[in-house]
Image: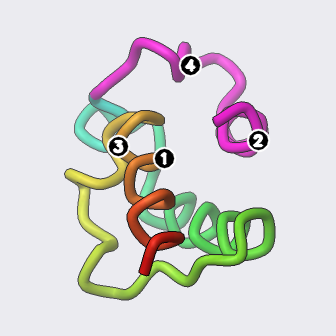
Amino acid sequence: MEELLEILREINPEVDYETCDTLVEDGYITSLQIVMLVGEINQEFGVAIPANKILPEYFNSAKSIYGLIRELEEE
């Protein structure tokens, strides 16, 4: 989880990623930043996030993003 938090802090260091659960809804991360995040996740965790999983519900919190990463690691 700490690796993910580091990646997110590079995108927007002003956000408290440990408590925020409206990252997309409140515009803390944009669609372009999500694309960049998907690339960083692929490099850091070795998982490819499929297009059908690039939805706000998976990217609204660090916890949901990490859950998606763990789910994809198990596949």
Depth check: 5 or 68 in front? Answer: 68
For the residues bearing labels 4 and 2, Cβ distance under 8 angstroms: no
The residue at which mark 3 appears reads as 64
What's drawn in magenta, residue-wise?
1-21
Query: Is 55 on the left or on the right of 36, as rendered?
Result: left
Q: Residue at coordinates 31% horizontally, 40% vertically from top-left?
A: 60
Q: Are circles 1 and 2 on residues that touch, CB within 8 Å?
A: no
Quadrant, the C terminus: bottom left
Q: Which is closer to the viewer, label 4 or label 3?
A: 3
Disc 4 marks a residue whose amino acid type is: Val
Which residue is tagged 4?
15
Q: Which mark is residue 54?
A: none
User: How far is the residue under mark 4 from the one under mark 2?
Assistant: 16 Å
Helix, strand or loop at disc 2? helix
- Identify the amino acid type marked 3: Ser
Residue drawn at (60%, 77%), measured in percent from left and top? 47
Secondary structure, mark 4, is loop
Observer-nearest residue: 56 or 28?
56
Residue 45: percent from left, percent from top: 71, 65
Instruction: Tell me, for residue 66, which label it has, or none.
Output: 1
19 is higher (above) or lower (below) than 59: above
- The tag earlier along the polypeptide, 3 or 2, is 2
Q: Alpha carbon of mark 3 to alpha carbon of mark 2: how far?
A: 14 Å
- Residue that lies at the very extreme toward the front in this rendered image: 74
Three-letter code, disc 1: Tyr
The answer to whether 64 is drawn above or below residue 2 in the figure is below
Q: CA distance from mark 1 to mark 2?
A: 10 Å
Q: Between marks 3 and 1, how big is the CA–CA gap?
A: 5 Å
Which residue is disc 2 drawn over? 3
- The answer to whether the residue labelled 3 contacts the one labelled 1, judged by CB atoms less than 8 Å apart, is yes
